Image (cartoon, grey):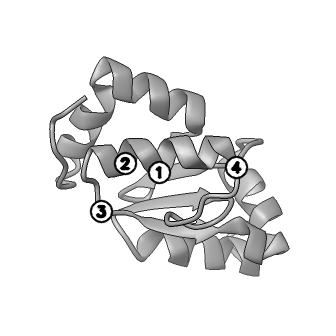
Amino acid sequence: MSDNPVFQQIKSEIDASPVTLFMKGTPVFPQCGFSARVVQILSHMGVPFRGVNVLENGEIREGIKAFSNWPTIPQLYVKGEFVGGCDIITEMFQSGELATLLSENGVPHSQAA
């Protein structure tokens, strides 16, 4: 599985930043409501993150689903670990779990929920 060039590319995208969001569109111009919601949460929390636009690369768009074994986009990674998609991130934000996860991983953010 690690010989898969798409998986290697995905891993290098994840490793390039402590917080990486695979999304449709860009952080400045999300192209789906779910991606926009996760961007809004991360921006509200002041989390520095890197967006990867899956619409620019069909192999990554399909590969990320197999890589994480998660069928939908967006997908959020913190320090190389898959955290979840839009619903999970929204729930974690509302419960305060997202702030805790970020703190535990040394990711700067505001505590505001």
The residue carrying pointer 1 sits among few (fewer than 14), some (14 to 19) or many (20 or more) residues within 10 Å by Cα, namely many
Work out how far the residue at label 4 is from the one at label 3, CA to CA, in angstroms: 20 Å
Of marks 4 and 3, the one in the foreground: 4
Where disc 4 sits, the SS reads: loop
- Measured as percent of width and height from the top left, residue 55 is found at 76, 68
- Measured as percent of width and height from the top left, residue 86 is found at 58, 36
* Residue at 78% from the left image edge and 76% from the top image edge: 57
* Residue matched to label 2: 42
| On screen, residue 94 above or below 55 | above
Which disc number belongs to residue 104? none
Which of the image's four quarters has the N terminus?
bottom right
Q: Earlier in the sequence, mark 4 or mark 1?
A: 4
Q: Are marks 4 and 3 in contact (CB under 8 Å)?
A: no
Where disc 3 sits, the SS reads: loop
* Residue at 45% from the left image edge and 22% from the top image edge: 91
Q: Are marks 2 and 1 in contact (CB under 8 Å)?
A: yes
Q: Is residue 18 visible?
A: yes
* Residue matched to label 1: 39
Question: Mark 4 belongs to which amino acid?
Answer: Cys
Question: Mark 2 belongs to which amino acid?
Answer: Leu
Question: Mark 1 belongs to which amino acid?
Answer: Val
